[in-house]
Image (cartoon, grey):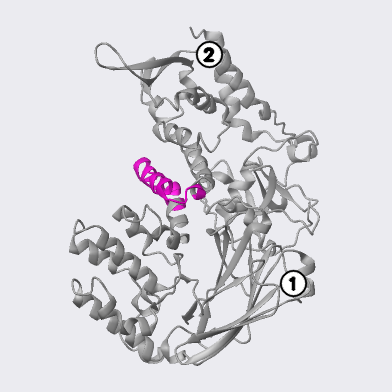
Amino acid sequence: MLTRRSLHSLQLLLLLYVSAGALNFNMFRDRNYTPKEGDVRLSGSIDVSEGRVEVYHEGRWGTVCDDNFDMAEAQVVCRQLNFPGAKSVIIGRQYQQVSPPETPGPIWLDDINCKGTEKHLVNCEFKSWGETDCSHKEDVGVLCQTGSTNETINDSTHSLDHSISLSDDLGQIFDSGNGCDFLILVRSPTGNIQENGTIEMAETMICAHKIILSLFPLFSASGGISSITVDVSSSCQLLFPSFIRYIYTRKIDVTLSSAICVHRMASTFGVKQLMEDVGRLFSKVIPDDSTFHNQVSIYNYAVETGDLILKETCVQFLAWNYQNLTRSPAWNSLPVELLGALLPRSDLVAADEYFVLQSVERWITEQKGSISLEIQAELLSHIRFPMIPAEKLYDLESNSSLYSSHKNMYREKMLTAFQFNILLFSKLATNPKFSKDSADYQPRIYTAEPWGAAVGPSVNPFNTRRRYEHDRDSYYIHSSPSRYAQTVSFRTPIHSSLIFNNSMIYWQANIFKSQNECSWNGVRCESVPVAWLAPNYNPDNMLYRNRVVTMCKGTVCQVQGFKGNLAPIATNGTSCLCSDEQYTYRVVVRPEYV
């Protein structure tokens, strides 16, 4: 029974839990302080209210890229550190490194988007842990408010923060059950059939505190009810007490095998932060199944639970590994909604656009008439016909399995593609139907030659010279050894349009894994490992949005964009579990009209 004294004590703890932000003793300068997942700090400055923003994840401090970082994000950082607010965002300042310069920490967050009301920086939207195209030169800093400048010494505030132990205190209250006033009956099927024909249920009773559970929607809607019954799967029943304990402590241990159970419970009870964080953990589970059945199941589960972060994580992984997906047992039974989510993406990795078209035609054919002509046309409309090599376009009418069913659409798309291949950009721009920003004219990530080239440890360490035929032009890919890292030389047309078929641009590419390798090759690197891709000149009216594809045992783990000639490689943030020696790389040239 909840006594008045225990209720008062519990309310006091909750008050401290919520208002702990008003108390601050700069715990990051306390030698006894142990950082927790999601903590932030300002480093590299003698002023405690200014510095490089760093966040703690998986036992390491890492930085935050300045892309899209504005005052809303700065306010969240400063308030999380218990300052009144933020004064300014600092971009381009080189703060002193906490760790040795030759081993900088990872860049944990990029393209972060805060509303400004979040209590913790990791509550804001961001790509995924370690997924970035930034270098440490773009580490963001902030300057926080410290209070009124009119305060006198005698009237200054000395804030104390003892909230670090509050989580454990609330955990002890849950463990003891003292003052609990809300019963949760947890039931799960045992698999045994009873005499009356029903399935036998295993039951567990949990006694909790309604005032704490009321922080979340399902419990707060229970009104005057003092108990509920919750049905869970037998595999999740043992995890349910740990989930309820998380509501008290905001701490839970999640393994890859328990992630789905914890995520489903968080989704059911509206524990949004836990749901999102576990959703990101799925990125480490997703690559495990070469049949792709698990990946498709996780996507369906994300749609069912409405978890947009998990859904995007799945779709992005499948887009990166599209070529493997099309050859997997899961391909023919792929949900049409999932295929429809993949095809519009520019980060889809494939040999070329003709491969994408062939794979979609094969999928539609395998459905044996169960897909309507309207849905077929919708899927085919996402094929970027202008990106299909001209020689493949010429033979498309005779080689396509669906041409006769969608003759008008194919003819219109092919006409547009041929115009793209034979007309200069200045002429195309006069056509009101042409828009250079249309997805049809944007390349995906095409890994086949001439646009893609392998680089790094997988390349033959000896001089090689291989002839490659491209229409009437023949050229060579060279691999030349250097003392510490291998530079690959190759060439491409300056654009995919057929009129530039004989106008070539030469590229050099490498993967530098140490600052010494950068120096020995005359390149200044802000961080390592880093991909380097440089042309021999920059053609007028052309823009190159090049990419480096990181792979582990044939699985694409990460795709990074180049800024200038460099692309940081964040293998610590990939979904693959490989040693540094097992990663392989491929650079991809992606030309666009300016």
State whether the magenta stretch is mostly helix, strand or loop: helix
Residue that label 1 marks: 524
Element type where label 2 sits in the image: helix
Q: Which residue is mark 2?
A: 7
The kind of residue on which mark 1 rests is: Arg
Q: What amino acid is at disc 2?
A: Leu
**Residue 130 in view in this figure:** yes
Q: Is residue 284 left or right of residue 508?
A: left
Number of other residues with Cα within 10 Å of mark 1, as a class: few under 14, some 14 to 19, many 20 or more = few
Q: Position of residue 282 (x, y in %)?
A: 50, 44
Whole-percent x, y for residue 346 in the image: 43, 67
Residue at the (46%, 90%) spot, across then down: 500
Q: Is residue 349 above or below residue 42?
A: below
Closer-to-camera residue (298/13): 298
- For label 2, count other residues whose C-alpha is less than 10 Å away and answer few (under 14), some (14-19) or many (20+): some
The earlier-in-sequence mark between 1 and 2 is 2
* Mark 1 vs mark 2: in front: 1
The residue lying toward the viewer, choosing from 315 and 351, is 351
Magenta range is 287-313
Q: Is residue 6 magenta?
A: no
Label drawn at residue 129: none
Q: Is residue 497 above or below residue 526?
A: below
Where residue 231 sits, quadrant-wise, is top left
Q: Residue at x 72, y 65 (%)?
A: 526
Where does residue 148 sit, x and y in percent of width and height? 69, 45
Can you say whether 140 is above or below 29 in the image?
below
Q: For the point 57% across and 25% down, which residue is it?
A: 15
- The Cα–Cα distance between marks 1 and 2, rounded to whole angstroms, is 62 Å
